[in-house]
Image (spheres, grey):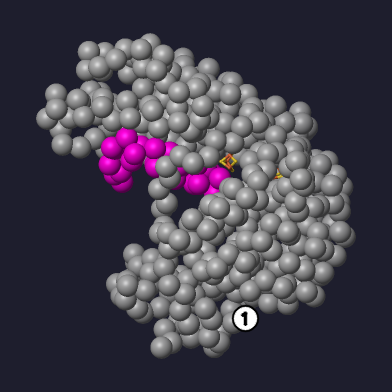
Amino acid sequence: MDYINMTYEEALSHAPKEEPARQYYFIERYKEVLDQLKASSGKEQFTFHIATFGCQMNSRDSEKLQGILEAIGFVGTDTEEADFVLYNTCTVRENANDRVYGRLGYLNSLKKKNPHMMIALCGCMMQEEKVVAKIKQSYRFVDIIFGTHNIFKLAELMYERLEEKKMVVDIWEGTDRIVEDLPTDRKYSFKSGVNIMFGCNNFCSYCIVPYVRGRERSRSPKDILEEVKQLVADGVVEIMLLGQNVNSYGKNLETPVSFAELLTQIDQVEGLERIRFMTSHPKDLSDELIEAMKHSKKVCKHLHLPLQSGSSRILKVMNRKYTREQYLELVEKIRAAIPDISLTTDIIVGFPGETEEDFNETLDVVKKVRFDSAFTFIYSKRTGTPAAKMEEVPEEAVKNRFDRLLTEVQKISSEVCGRDEHTVQKVLVEEVNDHEKGLLTGHMSNNTTVHFKGDSSLIGKIVDVYLDESRGFYYMGTLRP
Ligand code: SAH
Ligand code: SF4
Ligand code: F3S
């Protein structure tokens, strides 16, 4: 295009081969493009909007994508009426996909009004061939499609799009690379996710994640520790270590390191106050990890331990590699070591072949463990997974079971969440409550939400709060001096 000093070919021939230098180069090139666009259009600023679907991995990826857009000179905005709109998608259940298709039509109407607008799609959904084919055919106004393995390439792909004049599609099937040290912008100044591993090797029979996120890759402890120290120097007090199965961290490193060892090293970072992690697979949760959690002052009193089903028969077909008894024993062991720990879980209802008896076993585990909270999901068929070939449970039975499970989960949750009423607890102040003026909202170590009166200057600080009243899933409290 005429507003670029160099053609894409010229720019390409000058681009460094190695990363991340190559991306910094394209950030600079796009910056020049933006400056010229501003001059020619008279617009003072060019805006971007990122919509993130799915899990914490995607949220963290979005912070990296945001960092790149800001480095180029785009300014973030809350609305989709922006010059660059990016959807970071999830495909774990069908309804996540439907939401994206639903919103694309609206984006097209916005694009017709703004000649500068670009629309980009990335994330897990884009790793599916049939999705990309559908977008190429029915959503031709999309400018850029990329996947989960090459988010670091955003600036290069945007630059390429300017020259190409047609949809740029760059999806990698897999990768063994981890590109570090690109700009990121955190959503919160005081807390941050930290990727410790990418991908998943477990192939639970219902789950699409291993297909769209690739094989397990762990970052080196050195890189992780450096990132944590840098975050703490920037004012972060709470980190969330991220991986699909953090308990198998480090197994494929040149010098293997266990997750428990990593946790113990991170525990020693001065200035860091709280450590969380997500997600733990019950099959890999070691005694060593329980010990490390028990002896750490910083690891929060919360463990998310997805159950998926309480029936050993279904667990076997799900390829979860533990039985109902092993799960219950594990819970007992954890509670014996850390009595005040809060346990949360994920449960799938209506997995193919689930009988009333299987479901009752799930209900029974829920009653025995008494989770602080549980995310309950209706089974969603994912093409390409082994379970997709299995016979589905009739919809009506699934709905009925789902409602019964939800009722039980909520009843238990409201009973157990209130156990700290009338005590003083440490709370990380996270935001001003948007429903009630003058109230702040934060989380206890065990992740329960607390609302209390206070001034916004406390945001990012850990304060003592007296828990006056439990309201089921959260507390109303009073700030202690
Ligand atoms: N790695 C994590 C989970 C990632 S996906 C783990 O193993 O625990 C988050 C949750 O989505 C899963 O725990 C599961 O409960 C749910 N889920 C995954 N695939 C699903 C599907 N096909 N249908 C319904 N729920 C699903
Ligand atoms: Fe999916 Fe299982 Fe991997 Fe979790 S452990 S991401 S449920 S395959
Ligand atoms: Fe969804 Fe991908 Fe996470 S499929 S749950 S965003 S890993």
The residue shown at (80%, 75%) is 336
Q: Nearer the viewer, residue 334 or 418?
A: 334
Q: Whole-percent x and y of residue 263? A: 67, 60
Question: Which element is circle 1 on?
Answer: helix
The residue shown at (14%, 24%) is 40
The residue shown at (63%, 66%) is 267
Q: Which residue type carries mark 1?
A: Arg
Q: Quadrant of the N terminus?
A: top left
Q: Quadrant of the C terminus?
A: bottom left
Q: Which residues are magenta?
A: 54-78
Q: Nearer the viewer, residue 176 or 28?
A: 28
Q: Whole-percent x and y of residue 333? A: 82, 69
Q: Whole-percent x and y of residue 381? A: 67, 34
Res. 349 visible in picture: no
As for residue 74 lying within the magenta part, the answer is: yes
Q: Nearer the viewer, residue 145 or 371?
A: 145
Res. 303 visible in picture: yes
The answer to whether 442 appears left or right of 342 in the picture is: left
Q: Main secondary structure of the magenta part?
A: helix
View extreme (left): residue: 42
Q: Nearer the viewer, residue 397 or 255?
A: 255
Residue 45 vertical placement versus 290 (above, below) = above
Q: Quadrant of ligand 3?
A: top right
Q: Whole-percent x and y of residue 97? A: 52, 34
Residue 354 vertical placement versus 430 (above, below) = above
Q: Which residue, given by chain and number where applicable, does mark 1 sit on?
A: 419
As for residue 411 lying within the magenta part, the answer is: no
